[in-house]
């Protein structure tokens, strides 16, 4: 029996302009609408990490959302790539790295 192909999981990162990077989650969908939905679902996590409650679309297309030196976007890596290149630290609710 043929096994169905595994879905591709895309890394969504929270990045600060000073170089700090954290994993928000992985998503099987890679679109602006999916990213907005994920941010809404993880709103408490985003605020706990960044301390920023008002986000704006990034300047370039598919650039994610930006505020206060932070950027939330698709990193360009898949789960498979992160396993070999190294995973980002998880952006948990208990972590507060406000700048």
Image (cartoon, grey):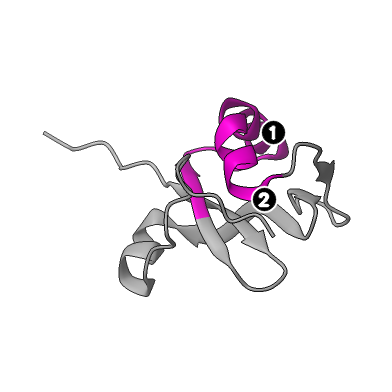
Query: Where is residue 92 drawn, in percent x and y?
Result: 45, 44
- Is 47 situated left or right of 67 in this image? left
Reply yes or no: does residue 5 show up in magenta.
Answer: no
Q: Residues within 10 Å of mark 1 (few under 14, many from 20)?
A: some
Query: Where is residue 29 drawn, in percent x and y?
Result: 54, 38
Determine the CA span between mark 1 and mark 2. 10 Å
Residue 44 found in image quarter: top right
Residue 34 found in image quarter: top right
Q: How many marks?
A: 2
Residue at image point 39% right, 65% down = 81
Residue at image point 66% right, 52% down = 73
Q: Above or below — where is 6 with respect to 18?
A: above
- Is 12 situated left or right of 64 in this image? left
Residue at image point 68% right, 73% down = 18
Residue 97 found in image quarter: bottom right
Provide the residue designation for mark 2. Answer: 72
Q: Which mark is residue 10?
A: none
Q: Which mark is residue 36?
A: 1
Query: Where is residue 77 drawn, in percent x and y?
Result: 50, 61
Residue at image point 58% right, 41% down = 48
- The part of the chain drawn in magenta is 23-51
Question: Closest to the observer: 33 or 1?
Answer: 33
Q: Above or below — where is 3 with respect to 10?
A: above
Q: Main secondary structure of the magenta part?
A: helix
């Amino acid at each position: 029996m043929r096994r169905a192909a595994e879905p591709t999981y895309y890394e969504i990162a929270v990045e600060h302009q000073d170089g700090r990077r954290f994993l928000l989650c992985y998503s099987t969908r890679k679109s602006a609408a999916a990213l907005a939905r994920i941010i809404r679902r993880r709103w408490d996590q985003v605020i706990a990490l960044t301390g920023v409650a008002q986000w704006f679309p990034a300047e370039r297309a598919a650039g994610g959302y930006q505020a206060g030196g932070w950027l939330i976007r698709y990193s360009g890596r898949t789960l498979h790539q992160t396993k070999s290149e190294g995973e980002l630290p998880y952006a948990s609710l208990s972590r507060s790295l406000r700048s």
